[in-house]
Amino acid sequence: TRRLTIAAAQLGPIARDESRRDVVARMEAMMRQAHARGAQLVVFPELALTTFFPRWFFEDQADIDAFFERDMPGPETQPLFDTARELGIGFYLGYAELTTQNGHTRRFNTAILVGDDGRIIGKYRKIHLPGHDEHEPWRPFQHLEKRYFEIGDLGFGTWNAFDSTLGMALCNDRRWPETYRMLALQGAEIMMLGYNTPIHYPPIPAHDHLQGFHNHICMQAGAYQNGMWVVSVAKAGVEEGCRLLGQSSIIAPTGEIVAMTTTQQDELLIHDCDLDQTREIREHIFNFALHRQPQEYGLITAS
Ligand code: CDT
């Protein structure tokens, strides 16, 4: 059978004043440990290079842009790419992307896939942006992704790499069944996803105790209903006074959690994923060609 040994590299909190250089050093150490333990591909969280800045309202655009990367790799992130090439190990990285297109500045919540030769293979820009776009001072902290990022313009894609078909998504995407189905319809065998999930949800605090449950119920269902592996990686712990959910996990195409972190710190999970296990689901209970009835699903794509 085809197999891919994949690492989920959960990161503990990143302080606002922690430098990119220090964060990258933490990540590089995890890449080296993952490689020593046999991993071929390492998955890092969403917005992995900085603190989760959408929790603050900034009036000055320069304060916002300080959290964005203008180049990838840039001077501070180059060591990740050098380490990938040196060790022959790939990685998925979430970061805030600032780019100029036709004279317009654009900002996205982005993930890239980097090959074991240190080259960028693919890019995904987050499609489901949660939160709000105006300052809401009543909240103990903000969730201004809708203000700071544009909706991703690259669609849901898959890439043939590491002798597998890989899909990328970011955080809130995992709560939407369409994300998994769009990737599975393109043959994804593994969905890689980084996240930053505050435990406290200010609009409905009665749901706070359900964060862990909602996290896994979406991904376990998505994995099973689409017959694919899900590798989900948190930024965890108390970051600038805001507690973020950990519980990074690796989920099999059966929907079973095969590995889960137990700390709120930098922590590695490693699993040898049997890619052919996807076929147990996709050639049987969820054989799309045989059983899907898309002619009945039009409402899903009507706006
Ligand atoms: N980063 C991210 O997408 N977080 C959201 C928080 C939802 S509450 C605004 C998530 O879905 O986990």
Image (cartoon, rainbow, N blue to C red):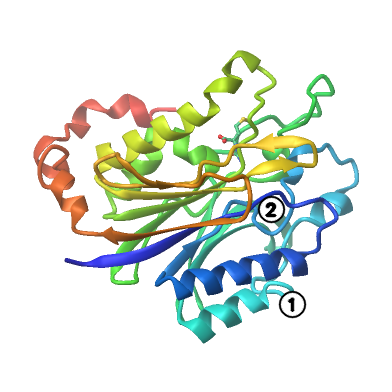
Expressed as whole percent of the image width and height from the top left, the position of residue 60 reads 90, 46
Q: Nearer the viewer, mark 1 or mark 2?
A: 1
Side (left or right) of 33 relative to 284:
right
Of the numbered discs 1 and 2, the one sitting upstream in the chain is 1
Q: Is residue 160 above or below residue 141?
A: below
Q: Amino acid at mark 2?
A: Arg
Q: Residue at x 83, y 37 (%)?
A: 57
Name the outermost residue toward the right.
Answer: 60
Q: Amino acid at mark 1?
A: Pro
Are the residues flagged by discs 1 and 2 in contact, CB closer than 8 Å?
A: no
Circle 2 sits on which residue?
Answer: 107
- What mark, if any, has residue 238 been given in the picture? none
Q: Is residue 281 above or below residue 21?
A: above
Query: Circle 1: is it few (<14), some (14-19), or many (20+) Cα within 10 Å?
Result: few
Asked if residue 113 can be seen in this view, the reply is no
Examine the image and state in which quarter residue 111 appears.
bottom right
Expressed as whole percent of the image width and height from the top left, the position of residue 205 reads 65, 16
Q: Is mark 1 within 8 Å of ligand 1?
A: no
Expressed as whole percent of the image width and height from the top left, the position of residue 155 reads 45, 51
Circle 1 sits on which residue?
Answer: 75
Q: How far, Cα to Cα, is label 1 from label 2? A: 19 Å
Side (left or right) of 256 relative to 179:
left
Say which element carries label 2. strand
Q: Residue at x 26, y 66 (%)?
A: 3
Side (left or right) of 60 relative to 173:
right
Side (left or right) of 59 relative to 234:
right
